[in-house]
Image: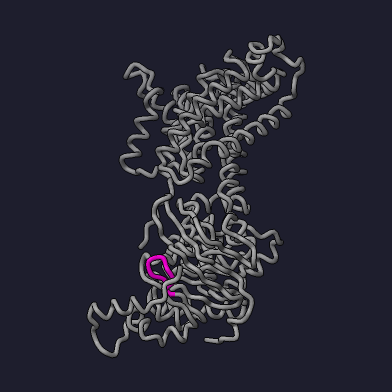
Amino acid sequence: MLDTAKADTETLLEVNNIEVIYNHVILVLKGVSLTVPKGGITALLGGNGAGKTTTLKAISNLLHSERGEVTKGSITYRGERVQDLSPEALVKRGVIQVMEGRHCFEHLTVEENLLTGAYTRGDGRGDVQADLEMVYSYFPRLKERRGSQAGYTSGGEQQMTAIGRALMSRPETILLDEPSMGLAPQLVEQIFDIVKRLNEEQGVTFLLAEQNTNVALRFAHRGYILESGRVVMDGPAAELRENPDVKEFYLGMSEEGRKSFRDVRSYRRRKRWLA
Amino acid sequence: MPADFYFAIEVILNGLMAGVLYSLVALGFVLIFKASGIFNYAQGVMALFAAMTLVGIMNGQVPFAHLFNAIFGTEIHYFGWQVPALFAILLTTLVMVVFAWAVQRYIFRHLVGQEPIILFMATIGLAYFLEGVGDLMWGSDIKTLDVGLPQGASFWIEEQTAFLGGEDFFGFFIDQLDIVAAGVAIVLVAVLVAFSQYTKQGRAMRAVADDHQAALSVGISLNYIWILVWSLAGFVALVAGIMWGAKSGVQFSLSLIALKALPVLMLGGFTSIPGAIVGGLIIGVGEQLFEFLVGPLVGGATENWFAYVLALLVLVFRPQGLFGERIIERV
């Protein structure tokens, strides 16, 4: 799962010290930097409100419709500045987001949901049909439910629909937000397995935001830990998994039992603050 | 008493025809409401404006003639040509598309993410604005619209059904224009349904109706879809304007047909195209039958309120309307 060789390959996405403000007043990201290498799975970790979703939306440019704005820093994809592009233009460049909470089109059937993913594509019906079969091969369950309204399918099926829909745009990079949300552990495992297979077989690059640190670090190559709008730690996933602080605060493993608040403070001092 | 029975049937048939026209107006509302959650108060005025533009183009009227006259002293009111109906309809459609673009560009693009009530108020403003612009462009006199649709009772139907009759029955009396309107409405609905169900843009339209954010995330341009939807609504308004205008002249009261569409929408559901059709038919027939059966007992004029009472009853027992989308809620 971990291969350091991949770290040397081409950088697709580069987020450099961005600051995001909602509604002109609420400062959410206070200087986040990260890089996503081609062909890797990069995990963005952290608790509620740490800024994971905002980071993803800043990249995919969905921030604008929520009155959010990147006020500082830069975002480049393949060396091109992308922060002023529309989400549509970004999808055409191969970057697509799967939003938190699935966001399927409830009244459309599963298959229609998948087909909307191919909206920006200009190629023929045959190619779209072939990709539909490809998606069904990864998610056989969706093929069974292709005719049902997405709103009536289960949470797991909706997550699969959302990922499948993104795949239909032939993406180079998928920004996957909180795929484990509200799903049973078994299903989470299954979804991550498919993410890994897509990564290896289809060469899709992933940047995923996840609260479930344990699962994410097992499947990702590299991780970034966010706290209150800042990156506090980053490194190869295997190293993060062994890091005593991560173990204690994110994985819930501790050798010395409960710690006092004084030690927590010392942990904070040890953190590397960026920006 | 077969004559009374036949008369009732005739009432129902006429009700159906009137209902078709209600449906046409309601359809425009549904299109916009479904795709953008905007209740477009201006739909009726759009029908009026479209009909005025059509008449103006057909008669070769100079738009804003009075304005030019006041400023430059030009006394030119007519170009002096007549435009054939079909070509004029095409040009008017084009005008409605430009109108859709302008509405999107100058109003709703600046109101993205606002409360529905604010969007609704914007459409009220739009209604008054459009009404004024219409008068300024084409003058506020009452115009007759003649695009060559047949008028008057259909003698063919009268002759064909006369054999049913007894001593005082001479066949069903149905306006030819109503028959044409029904035919046009059926074709229009079939095309719209096919478009939204089986084409890529139609699918995108329904996707936008379901979830704006998700539609954005897969690369659908909301702006483009909304212009598309307003253009379609503009075209539907044009068709409704032609039918009503041919029936009762192009004048201000044409814009009030929007009020007739309201109970239709409550009955059929704001989000359902078939609902708009069936709702219109139910109200058309219900209105006529009620007037026929109950009207004499209460002194008549029940047409003015029957539709609203019916709509209220539906609201009490089935708030989403008879055909409104089931509200899907899952956790």
* Residue A38 part of the magenta-drawn span: no
Q: Which residues are magenta?
A: A225-232
Residue displayed at 56% across by 86% down: A4
Looking at the image, residue B91 sits to the left or right of residue B261; the answer is: right
- The answer to whether residue A1 shows anywhere in this view is no
Above or below for A130 versus B36: below
Query: Which of B314 and A22 lies nearest the eye of the viewer?
Result: A22
User: x and y percent of residue B88 in the render?
Assistant: 71, 27
- The answer to whether residue B54 shows anywhere in this view is yes
User: x and y percent of residue B91 in the render?
Assistant: 70, 30
Query: Which of B163 and B182 lies nearest the eye of the viewer?
Result: B182
Residue displayed at 42% across by 72% down: A273
Looking at the image, residue B96 sits to the left or right of residue A73; the answer is: right
Above or below for B52 versus A120: above
Looking at the image, residue A142 sits to the left or right of residue B153; the answer is: left
User: x and y percent of residue B118 in the render?
Assistant: 42, 37
Q: Main secondary structure of the magenta part?
A: strand
Residue displayed at 58% across by 25% down: B49
* Residue A228 part of the magenta-drawn span: yes
Residue displayed at 47% across by 29% down: B125
Above or below for B96 versus B31: above
User: x and y percent of residue B200 in the render?
Assistant: 62, 54
